[in-house]
Image: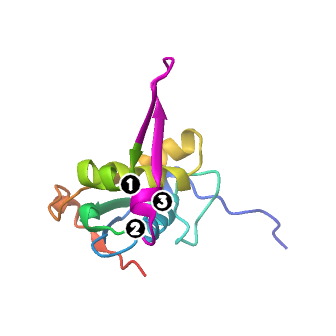
């Protein structure tokens, strides 16, 4: 009986490109699917301490929806580092100005908060409209449930 755990080698990891359409879908639902694909949890070779995930392209972020009263109640905060440097932005303003940022923020929170998560985030491309510049990679369409 073999008691060794399988761990994929770097050369054995196959990466595909997937495209997700966020139009008329909840921002959080799209973000969870993207995080799952970036981590590689949909593959049988998933390893928690390795980046086995795929590349993800998200289009139509401007058409993603928030449920309930989140557009007015959800607040994105960041600090400049200076005294009184707290900046606040509501989800409504964020979706009008930079919908890609809102999607990136949601996905980043679902990935590991370490160097592995930062490495996974580099495989993400987010676009506000339906046009993207990754047609050469021949991305497959991934249906968001």
Q: Residue at x 51, y 17 (%)?
A: 83
Residue situated in front as seen by the camera: 133 or 1: 133
Number of disc labels: 3
Residue 66's disc is 2
Q: Residue 140 falls in which quadrant of the image? A: bottom left
The reply, left or right, for residue 115 in relation to residue 144 is right
Residue situated in front as seen by the camera: 45 or 119: 119
Please tell me whether mark 1 sits on a helix, a strand or a loop. helix
Which residues lie in the magenta part?
A: 66-88
Q: Residue at x 56, y 44 (%)?
A: 116
Please tell me whether mark 2 sits on a helix, a strand or a loop. loop
Q: Locate residue 68, reporting x and y percent.
A: 45, 72
Q: Locate residue 59, reporting x and y percent.
A: 25, 64
Q: Dot 3 corresponds to which residue?
A: 53
The answer to whether the residue labelled 2 contacts the one labelled 1, judged by CB atoms less than 8 Å apart, is yes
The colouring scheme, among rainbow, by chain, secondary structure or one colour, is rainbow
In the rendered image, the vertical position of residue 81 relative to residue 44, given as above or below:
above
Foreground mark, 1 or 3, reads 1
Inter-mark Cα distance, 2 to 1: 9 Å
Inter-mark Cα distance, 1 to 3: 29 Å
Q: Residue at x 32, y 67 (%)?
A: 64
Q: Residues within 10 Å of mark 1 (few under 14, many from 20)?
A: many
Q: Quadrant of the N terminus?
A: bottom right
Q: Residue 113 falls in which quadrant of the image? A: top right
């Amino acid at each position: 009986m073999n008691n060794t755990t399988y761990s994929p080698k770097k050369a054995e990891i196959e990466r595909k490109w997937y495209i997700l359409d966020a139009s008329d879908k909840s921002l959080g639902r799209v973000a969870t699917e993207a995080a799952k694909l970036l981590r590689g949890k949909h593959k049988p070779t998933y390893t928690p301490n390795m980046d086995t995930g795929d590349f993800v392209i998200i289009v139509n972020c401007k058409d993603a929806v928030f449920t309930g009263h989140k557009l007015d109640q959800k607040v994105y905060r960041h600090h400049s580092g200076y005294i009184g440097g707290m900046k606040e932005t509501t989800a409504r303003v964020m979706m009008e100005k930079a919908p890609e940022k809102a999607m990136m923020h949601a996905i980043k929170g679902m990935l590991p908060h370490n160097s592995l998560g930062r490495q996974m985030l580099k495989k993400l491309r987010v676009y506000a409209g339906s046009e993207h510049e990754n047609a050469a990679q021949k991305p497959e369409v991934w249906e968001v449930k």
